[in-house]
Image (spheres, grey):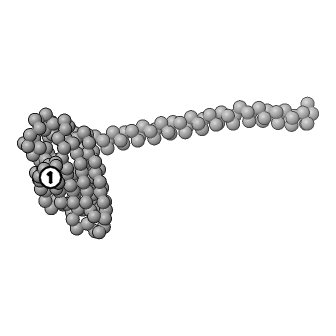
Amino acid sequence: MSRQQTLLMIVAVLAVLQFLVVPAFDWLDTQRISVIAEQQKAQKEQALLQARAPLEAQLAEVDSYLSSITQLAFTADSMQMATLAIQGIVEKSAEKHDVKINRISWVEPDGKEQLHHKIEIFIEAYPSDWVALQSDLEGKSWLLLDKMNFFYSRRTGDTSLIGRIRGGLSFNVNVWIENDSSN
């Protein structure tokens, strides 16, 4: 076998190896990436489960606290009990986020301008603290309410929370931020 034929054979073998080995390495690389992606997904799911566990425990606690309220007749007493429950949720959340509550007041409807029962909550908070408190309250709101919406104006520090107790009782909760540094 001449030297030229040997070189041609080597080139041919290398060409064949390139078609076999490169795809094999690509396949191995794809498998490695896939395994890493699966591991990362499993880690994220585990972290999510661990993060959710304390919240679910809190929600279960609040749920047991509120379970009797949603079954009460639509009376002033049930509204006051609902108010106390909402106040309890706000106070627990405020304590958790180091938000100081100055006062909470319960306002009866006057039949003219104010058609619904109203809870006014006056707190001291910076906007970032309020966002954490708001998120915490929204996370618990489904236990008591069909609907609960927050509207926050940074300029005025006025937050309205409008809710409807399961079954139809409407009420308003106004959260006022006092001594807000954003003003």
Residue 96 in percent (x, y) is at: 21, 53
Residue 110 in percent (x, y) is at: 11, 52
Judge by depth and name the residue closer to the eye, 144 or 165: 165
Residue designated by label 1: 112
Residue drawn at x 21%, y 56% is 175
Tell whether 17 sits left or right of 138: right
Residue 141 in percent (x, y) is at: 24, 44
Judge by depth and name the residue closer to the eye, 109 or 63: 109
Tell whether 44 sits left or right of 69: right
Q: Is residue 78 above or below residue 174?
A: above
Q: Quadrant of residue 32?
A: top right
Query: Helix or strand or loop: what does disc 1 sit on?
Result: loop
Quadrant placement of the N terminus: top right
Quadrant placement of the C terminus: bottom left
Residue 67 in percent (x, y) is at: 15, 36
Residue drawn at x 24%, y 51% is 161
Judge by depth and name the residue closer to the eye, 40 or 72: 72
Q: Residue extending furthest right?
A: 2
Callout 1 amino acid: Lys
Tell whether 17 sits left or right of 109: right
Q: Residue extending furthest front?
A: 112
Residue drawn at x 78%, y 35% is 15
Q: Is residue 118 above or below residue 123?
A: above
Q: Is residue 157 above or below residue 42?
A: below
Tell me the crowding category of disc 1: few under 14, some 14 to 19, or many 20 or more residues within 10 angstroms, Cα based. Answer: few
Q: Quadrant of residue 62?
A: top left
